[in-house]
Amino acid sequence: MKTIKALGCCVLFFGTMNFAVADSDVRFEHGRKPHADKFSIALIGDLPYSPAQEPEFVNLMADLDRAKITFTVHDGDFKGGSVPCKDELYQLRFRQFNDAKHPFFYVFGDNEWTDCHRAAAGGYNPFERLSYLRSLFSPNDHRSMGKKQLPLDRQSPEFPENIRWNYGGVLFVGLHVPGSNNGLTTRADFKVEAEQEYAQRNAANLQWLQDSFALAAEQHAAGVMLFVQANMWDFIPAANLTGYEDFIVALAAETKAFGKPVVLVNGDSHYFRIDKPLPSKLPSEVKDSEFPFIMPWESSAPRLQNFTRVETFGNPNSHWVKANIDRHDPNVFSFEEHIVEKNIAP
């Protein structure tokens, strides 16, 4: 396993603002005490995509089992968009996630349900696939997957996939924000139902986001790390991003009000990166409210310094990102890329 550290870039991302939190200021949900002042977690997503990549996923999971990490988060798309959405494949992933040595968390991607209408994916009803996904991966319990488990909170019986948990004075939040324009890109005969599903889920996501930041403030959390599947910024034309506008604006407002380090982890475009796509001014503070949020790479506006986006590796690169968390560090989060040697392409 090769390890390339990226600590310096993270200091740059968060700047020199002092976000350190005193021990006496930290409170924990349900009276829990801090698990550790320093710990590391693994971030993966967008894999495995095909039968040919299954052995690489086995190598990756074995690498994670050997790693000194506290838990793993998969940020969605555990199959390719053109791979049939069969029950048997979903059940295999469920077993693999639960066989992990460490606690394992998972947020839903578009390939698991939204894109199942595609002929190559089996021509399924995407909403039936979503129902099955929830029944399998988000049962009526409050535990992570994995051989070792951690407690978590679920938003509601209607949206059990929206989760959060507090570990070591940091709040972790999973939200159901998939690719394919947040589920709006679908077959014509599913369009009406897709718009209805989106409206309900988007409202739930916005509420979960708001409630989670309120909880983080109440707990005096040192930082917040969010997990979604979608890359909400990096597609052209911008029309492919309309399903994310509400979420991005709310995320910016909550992050700015929170004032401490916030990290958004996503997959979707299969390109490992660490950047700062949110501008420092909210839409209400600029003349053109869409421009800097929907197409940030065209904007020279100053960046929101306490916000960082991390995109995980994905097909065809079966590797992982290590996030190091230290609630006494002003930056709280730093990152390392971990290359699984057995998965290096010849």
Image (cartoon, rainbow, N blue to C red):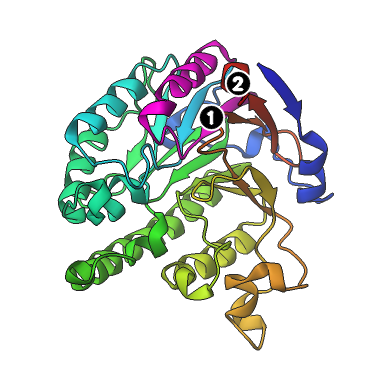
Q: Secondary structure at mark 1?
A: loop
The answer, for residue 93, to whether it is visible in the render is yes
97 falls in the magenta region:
no
Check disc 1 and report the residue beneath it.
Answer: 318
Tell me residue 261's x, y (percent): 67, 48
Amino acid type assigned to the residue bearing label 2 in the image: Val
Q: Tell me if 275 is positioned left or right of 78 in this view.
A: right
Q: Which residue is mark 2?
A: 340
Q: Is residue 157 visible?
A: no
Q: Residue at x 59, y 15 (%)?
A: 68
Q: Nearer the viewer, residue 36 or 319?
A: 319
In the image, residue 45 sits, relative to residue 101, either above or below, namely below
**Magenta range:** 38-67
Q: Earlier in the sequence, mark 1 or mark 2?
A: 1
How far apart marks 1 and 2 lie (CA) works out to 7 Å
Q: Residue at x 65, y 74 (%)?
A: 292
CB within 8 Å, label 1 to label 2? yes
